[in-house]
Image (cartoon, rainbow, N blue to C red):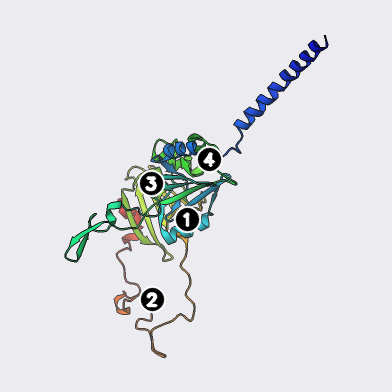
Amino acid sequence: MNRLRLSLFAAAALLLALPVSADDTKSQANSPSDKMTPRTRLEVMRDLTAERVYVRHPFPMGDRGLQIKNGVVTPSDQQIASLIAEHGLAAKPGDRVIITNVLVKEKSIVMEINGGPKKHEKWYQHVSVGAGGSTTPLGGAPKSLEAKGSLLTLEFDKYVPELTGEQVRGLLAPVFDFKALTEAEAYEKTLPPKVQDAIKNHKVLVGMDREMVVYAKGRPPKKIRDRDDSGADYEEWIYGNPPEEVQFVRFQGELVTRLEIMTVDGQKIVRTEKEVDLKSAETEVADKKPEQKPANAPTLRRPGEQPEYPQGTSNVPPSAYPPPGTTTPTDSPGGMPPHWRAAGL
């Protein structure tokens, strides 16, 4: 009898312990602390290599590239602007790129885009053949080693955990768009909601850049360049022909500073107040003003020697400038603005 009771107690204790051990096993299997196995590394590298994606963030050329850690993209926009100004732009938001190589390291996954920051040579380009003391490269003339790609590094705290290719894609979402079908769709997703709505409705907002206007209105049929009343240079894109509605989109630098609309019924609408405030790496580079030269900047002139053309920094002599009050080709007869004349008004 005592043996039977002991057997029953032992069986009950075993049954109670089974669900706990099962849950422990399940939680350990799903634990993100598991390191990525060598087999999974190969699967992830094969899954992502040669994948074509759209970018959501500007990429500077070079081996600095971009980094993602805990969902945060670095470097900052200002640092990216400096890198682009120094090394060039590898890809801008909306561009389609190809992941040309994937390397899984101890604490990171490194991806090359568009060939990476270094140009890779073929093995036969290092072989030379010849006779009589002269040699010729087997691969022909050496090609330029200038690379146009960049890097994206997905970083982890301790080590790369066990992840599938689809999970890695989710972690890359701040920078890569794997689901966009077209370049325009991918580009629109990178913009503020107000700008997205304007592009969908084919409208221009003061503060847009050139690329946004092209997506909203298309390539401009007409362009003019001139100077405003303050002497600042501008470029104006003209959409439409009278008697239809005509829009004059004025750029100073990379951004729209003025929008003038001549409606069908003859009304004139002018907007100059900024309607959207954009500060991307590209606009920061475009808006960056040149550094002021010091007052005691070095010169090649001898002490006491006067500059050849003292009226300005140009090498054009003063006699080449028209006298004050002379009508220039940009002046319009009858007071009609030059951009109206270009539109045929």
| Mark-to-mark CA distance, 1 and 2 | 38 Å
N-terminal of the pair, mark 1 or mark 3, is 1
**Of tags 4 and 2, which is closer to the observer?**
4
| Horizontal side, residue 124 vs residue 72: left or right | left
N-terminal of the pair, mark 4 or mark 2, is 4
| Horizontal side, residue 80 vs residue 244: left or right | right
N-terminal of the pair, mark 3 or mark 2, is 3
C-beta proximity under 8 Å, tags 4 and 1: no
Instruction: Name the residue at 27% across, 58% down.
Output: 142
N-terminal of the pair, mark 1 or mark 2, is 1
> What residue is shown with label 4?
171
**Residue 340 x/y as whole percent:** 34, 53
C-beta proximity under 8 Å, tags 4 and 2: no
The answer to whether residue 119 is seen in the rendering is yes
In the structure shown, which secondary structural element does the residue marked by tag 4 occupy? helix
Q: Which residue of the protein is positioned furthest toward the left in this rendering? A: 132
> What residue is shown with label 2?
313
Instruction: Name the residue at 42% across, 38% down.
Output: 46
**Residue 278 x/y as whole percent:** 50, 51
Q: Amino acid at mark 4?
A: Leu
| Mark-to-mark CA distance, 1 and 3 | 31 Å
| Mark-to-mark CA distance, 3 and 2 | 35 Å
In the structure shown, which secondary structural element does the residue marked by tag 3 occupy? helix
Q: Amino acid at mark 3?
A: Val
**Residue 140 x/y as whole percent:** 22, 56
| Mark-to-mark CA distance, 4 and 2 | 52 Å
Mark sitting on residue 214: 3
Quadrant in which the N terminus appears: top right
> What residue is shown with label 1?
64
Residue nearest the observer in this picture, 233 or 292: 292
